[in-house]
Image (cartoon, rainbow, N blue to C red):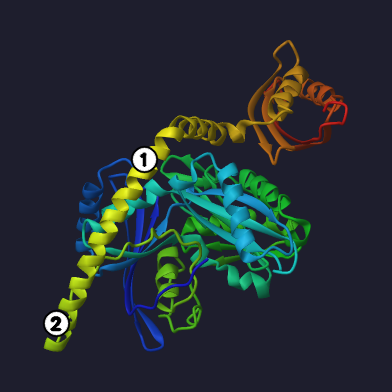
Amino acid sequence: MTGSQKTNSLLGLVLDGSRLDFVAAKRTNGSVEIRKVGSVTLALDPLTNDPELVGAELRKHLEAAGLRDRRCVVGVPLNWVLTLAVKVPAGLSPEDVQALLAMEAERGFPYAPETLMLAQSLVGAADGERTATVIAIPRDHVTRLQGALESIGLRPVSFTLGITALQPVGESATAGGVVALVPGEKGVALQVTAQGGVCALRMLEGAFEQDGSERRVQKDYLARELRITLGQLPDDVRATVRNLKVFGGGDLAEELQEQLCARAEALGLRTQLVKEFAPLEFGVTLPSGTSANAALALVVRHLTGKASGFEFLPPHVSQWQQFMEQYSSKKLVYGAGLLGCVMFVMAALFGWQQWQLTRLESQWQGMEARVTQVDQLSAKIRKFRPWYDESFRAMTILKTLTEAFPEDGTVSAKSIEIRDRSGVTFSGTARNTTAMLKMREKLQAARNVTDIKLEYSKGGQNNQPLEFTFNFHWGETQASK
């Protein structure tokens, strides 16, 4: 997590699918003046189209809105994000923590480290065992978006996530944990903050169902995903999460809050709909009735120099702005003498370098074949390391599930999710309730299967197919090993 540089005027851009929200604001003394707020639909996808063409479309929309700002903060879509939870033992130095997270990121993400941009958030007290949430975004996604912005003269000063600006982690260290929900084009963004860090970050893409021109909130799906997300938190962290905030001023946000209110209370959460920011929400005065949106939150936090969340801004390689300053005549004399000395030293170093190159070239020819072989072996190890598991745990789980299926085809599978190598969520359909119960009994009798719970069921009456979801724990016995 990083801080932000203070600027007087700033443009905020938040990308969500094909929708782009923008806010232009200026800080004046102790207040923030909001000059322009808007939203447009982009015809070109920044990930698949030429950056200059995407930039040209952005310029057209910004000029139509009358915006001339050059410095901007950018909120990237949450569905670009990959997440990984890592246990951090107590007593590690900051350097050791970073080394541990880098190693776990290389093992846990399905991409090479050099192709990802990483950030992390630590949850828990510094003197105890902590949990780190490691966030990764493909580097190519950010560079393509950056190229589109720079092609029209914009200067990005931050790439981050909009939801982390709406609900910062700092508040969770003093006011308790918070579940933040933000409805968007692709679904509902979910973030859980507690004990000074981000515990969970997800995009719930099945949160809405299209009904003609309207979208309906899928409250059962959302309640289930919320329950699963909270259930994956450590017990001490889960105990601090007591609030649920829905951000947004539209009808969809209101419906989301209404549909989840009862379900959230059953989980011990108090719900709150955040439609507007308070006048002193960010420590500076905002206009009355300021709508709560991610683009505005990003801009105001950057203008006030506060941390805005995970940072994915590519490192800037600075160029020399000036080759030579103005010198007095005395400095020119000293410079000429120094130049002569430098040329003499360079000639001597060049001769010594040639001798070293000749000697090293000879040594290299003697070891080149062995080095090439070692490089090839190292590449194979890096490629196949994530797939190495002598216990074949995933295949064993799938085999056990397959053997539990009735042979008459009365039960079929829809999805199987294996979490943390032991938690299994299985969804499917059955011809009737009896077939589902028989499969459950057979699965419960299987070795290594424990804690079978029916999380969800729908249908099953009047000979209608029954949809169901099981959760169970997989623990290999000593004998199986």
- Of tags 2 and 1, which is closer to the observer? 1
The kind of residue on which mark 1 rests is Glu
Residue named by callout 1: 361
Q: Quadrant of residue 197?
A: bottom right
Residue 401 badge:
none
Question: Residue 149: where, in percent of width, then height?
Answer: 27, 57
Question: Residue 99: where, in percent of width, then height?
Answer: 60, 55
Q: Which residue shows up at 67% across the image and 50% down it?
A: 229
| Whether residue 220 is visible | yes
Give yes or no for contact between labels 2 and 1 (Cβ–Cβ under 8 Å): no
Q: Badge 2 local density, few (<14 within 10 Å), some, or many (20+)? A: few
| First in residue order: circle 2 vs circle 1 | 2
Q: Badge 1 local density, few (<14 within 10 Å), some, or many (20+)? A: few
Q: Secondary structure at mark 1?
A: helix
The kind of residue on which mark 2 rests is Leu
Disc 2/disc 1 C-alpha distance (Å): 41 Å
Question: Residue 19: where, in percent of width, then height?
Answer: 36, 52
Q: Secondary structure at mark 2?
A: helix
Relative to 198, say whether 324 is above or below: below
Q: Which residue shows up at 22% across the image and 56% down it?
A: 151
Dividing the image into 4 quarters, which one contains the C terminus? top right
| Whether residue 466 is visible | no
Foreground: 215 or 293? 293
Residue named by callout 2: 332
Q: Residue furthest left?
A: 329
Relative to 21, say whether 338 is above or below: below
Q: Quadrant of residue 478?
A: top right
Foreground: 219 or 345? 345
324 on left or right of 349: left
Relative to 154, say whether 449 is above or below: above
Question: Residue 203: where, in percent of width, then height?
Answer: 53, 48
